[in-house]
Image: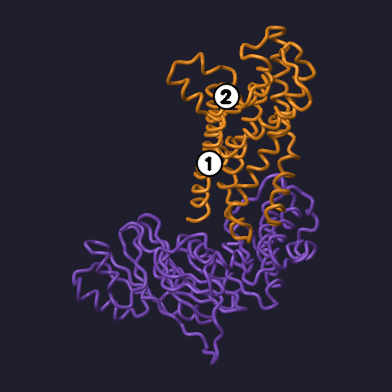
Chain colours: A purple, B orange
Amino acid sequence: MSTDIDHPASPTKPAPIATLDGVTRRYGQVTAVDRLSLQLQRGQTVALLGPNGAGKTTTVELLLGLARPDEGVVRLFGGPPADAVAAGRVGAMLQDAGLPQGARVAELIGLVGSLYPKPLSLAEVLRLADLEGVAGRQVQRLSGGQRQRVRLALAVAGNPELLVLDEPTAALDVDARRAFWHRVRGYVSTGRTVLFATHRLEEADAVADRIVVIAGGRLLADGTPDQVKAQAAGRSTVSVAVDGLSRYLLENLPAVETVRQDRGRVTLSTSDPDATVRALLQQAPDVQGLEVRRAGMEEAFLQLTHEEGGTS
Amino acid sequence: MSGWLAYLWLEAKRQWRNREILIFRLGLPTAIYLILTAAQGDTPPSSGPGGRIVAVAALGAVISGVAAGPSLGDERANGWLRQLRTTPLRPSAAVAAKVAVAMSFALPAIALVAAAGGMVGDNEGIALGWAQWLRLVGLMWLATMPITALGALIGLTFGGEAAHGATTLAFVVLWLGGGIFTSPDNLPDTLAAISRALPSYGVVQVGESVAAGRSLPASAVVVLAAWTVGAGALAALAWRRVVTR
């Protein structure tokens, strides 16, 4: 049910640097990533956009080889992710990754850099991550923002071709967030590739040149920020009283993308409300409290990415 | 290899500059030895010549040896191990470094107790030459290897707080059950058999045989080797689970 927006076709498309091909990953009963296919091209800054629980972190982990797919194939620089990681072609900032107590900032950056074949110099990394003032400090004495910058520094220290950032600005305020992206832009201006996970549309819009929207582990949209916003804006919601309606029926109505239940009402997001309502009335003629709304921009996006279901 | 050395170096600096770690791992065993010697005076230890030195040195070996557990457990829980896994560092290098650093504390811990024994322990009834002292410290240190492997296994099996708890439990079992202050000879048969199979008892046996000028008992060598291989292999399996979900 995902709707891809085609990229402006370039006649000779180079090989992607990362590919997820029909990848599924389950944790117990939960399908974190569901038949996801995705390609990253060199030089792109790609936002992986979705609400909490959308499967962003699992997607990042699959890409880095930290999680194995149950189905499908993940390739990174043409091979298994572990090989690309071992070759030092990837740098990553994982969500909430801790730092080893007692290590000094410069020591940690120096260590991580020394693991890569062509690292940035320590001075460069310190400047890029704005850590020059605290280079000699032990990590447990850093503020939250400083720690966040250390984690960015560790991701770029090895000068990797692909930078993967999982919710990198989650703990930062607005100013710090802006400064963070300013630094990342400084790093990627030389043709490097970035994939970052975020749940903020405005962040994806401001930073990325391509947005991949996922929810419930599935691809919902993929395109430039303008394309994705246009697609979100074209959405409507249909909501009805929940009485006796089966989730199966609702999910399989035409044009329905997500189904959400909240306090006795079910809200469907649909790209074609006419078709959805027509089919709904046909299959459940005695449905109560029908309401059709054209979604505003933010609301439409929330619909697009809202966690599916929850109570039903 | 150079990556591993760089990581080992940072790991060693990090732990060696921590004063609390130094006091606990190096100061405590020596202090216990001095207190015991002062308290027990001229009563020769029941476990034979040098028995007190060996027992306390083994205690020091256990304290340093299991220390890889909480350290790995914390870093497993806070995500640092996974962060490392995104770098070209060989995945097992982090564990190997923890074991190596734990061993780097065990050596001076044993040596300090032996030195204290050499200086104040006239009542121990041993007369060892330099070479024998070195042999005592060196062999007891090597015998600590399985305990560090056990520490690594605990840290990789349990994350965070649970790793601290499990390490404490292992420490108490190795200390009280492992023949350090109570010889298995005084225990009921089943407990004695368990006690003799613990690696800390192997460390004690190695120490006692060197202090008495005997050759190493084969049973101790077998027990120590089996623990090293067993705990090491299980730790390797646990490691795989930690880094790849």
Residue B149 lies, in percent from the top left, at 57, 40
Q: Which mark is residue A51?
A: none
Callout 2 secondary element = helix
Chain letter for mark 2, please. B
- Quarter holding the N terminus of chain A is bottom left
Whether residue B9 can be seen here = yes
Whether residue A216 can be seen here = no
Which residue is label 2 attached to? B175
- Quarter holding the C terminus of chain A is bottom left
Along the horizontal axis of the image, is B212 left or right of A124? left
Residue A201 image-quadrant placement: bottom right
Tell which of A88 and A272 is nearer to you: A88
Residue A17 lies, in percent from the top left, at 56, 76
Tell me: residue A175, above or below residue A190: above
Q: Give me the C-alpha separation between circle 2 and circle 1.
A: 21 Å
Along the horizontal axis of the image, is A48 left or right of B123? left
Residue A16 image-quadrant placement: bottom right
Residue A130 image-quadrant placement: bottom right
